Amino acid sequence: MIVEEFIGNGANWNVKRISITNNGKTISFIHKESIKNTSVNPNIVNYNKVASSKLPTLSFFRQKIIDGLEVIEAEDLNPINCDGFYVSPNTARNSPSCASEIVKFLDSCNKENTISNQCKQFDISEYLRNPETISDDLDKLHEIRILQGAEKYVYENKIKAISNFSHFLNASKTDMEIATNNKIELFSDSFFFRVSASDNKIDYKIADFDCINLNSDIDKGELLNANKSYFETSLCEFIDFFIDEKQREIYKSELKNVWEE
């Protein structure tokens, strides 16, 4: 049995999970289809460079021709029964908030439209009667992001603890040096983070290959600082969106201390 599940889209790709069940065993992988009918080759080139540099990345990422169309077939970061979920801080950052959805709803001529379940805790009927009252809830409304899939689950079930954070930071610094030595510029959108459910250890994979610049002509020192800054930005956003509020400043402080050593 083959099941296709649409799991998201961005500026360049529609993304599906393909699950194949045979004799009770299910395997899954990802298909990325270009929205703009552009070649997948630049992404393949970027992946191959990252993989050959031994940086943490997908186990496979390859071209596939389906019905005459180019698609990318890639490892599924979050298959069934996975040990924690890889999530993208970029996805959370760019997702709409309850504030934007409710304001759009209030401005709409069609009040038959529905509001996301994630925003149902707010009194929409009161906003309809007295739209000015929305200002009282704006901070909370902006905080709540409308997400789906793995990002939605982790966002709603915040991570309480990370058991290997210091080791992870030091290993990541080494990774940024490896990327720099290979003239790879890794922008913030390329990183996906996971904290495992079994032992609370954090790790990451480079999994967005639109957001990579190869053969950068930036001075080596500047490139290293840039890569460290991009990684730090992404990890700080991961902490803000997916870590329990009581722990955020602890991890941010440790990140700052280790990163500046």
Image (tube, rainbow, N blue to C red):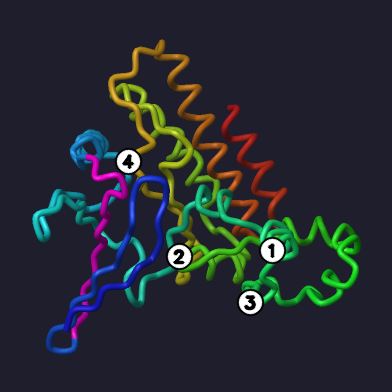
The residue tagged 2 is 196
- The circle drawn on residue 117 is 3
Q: Nearer the viewer, mark 2 or mark 4?
A: 4
| Magenta region, residue range | 25-38
Q: Disc 4 on helix, strand or loop?
A: loop
Q: Distance between the residues labelled 2 and 1?
A: 42 Å
Q: Earlier in the sequence, mark 2 or mark 1?
A: 1
- Between circles 2 and 1, the one closer to the viewer is 1
> Label 3 crowding class (10 Å Cα cut-off): few <14, some 14-19, many 20+?
few
Residue farthest along the bottom direction in this orientation: 24
In whole angstroms, how far apart are the C-alphas of marks 2 and 4? 24 Å
Amino acid bearing label 2: Ser
Q: Where is residue 54 in the image (x, y as percent from the top left)?
A: 25, 39
Q: Name the residue under label 1.
A: 108
Decide whether the magenta segment is chiefly helix, strand or loop: strand
Q: Name the N-terminal-most of marks 3 and 4.
A: 3
Q: Residue at x 58, y 49 (%)?
A: 93
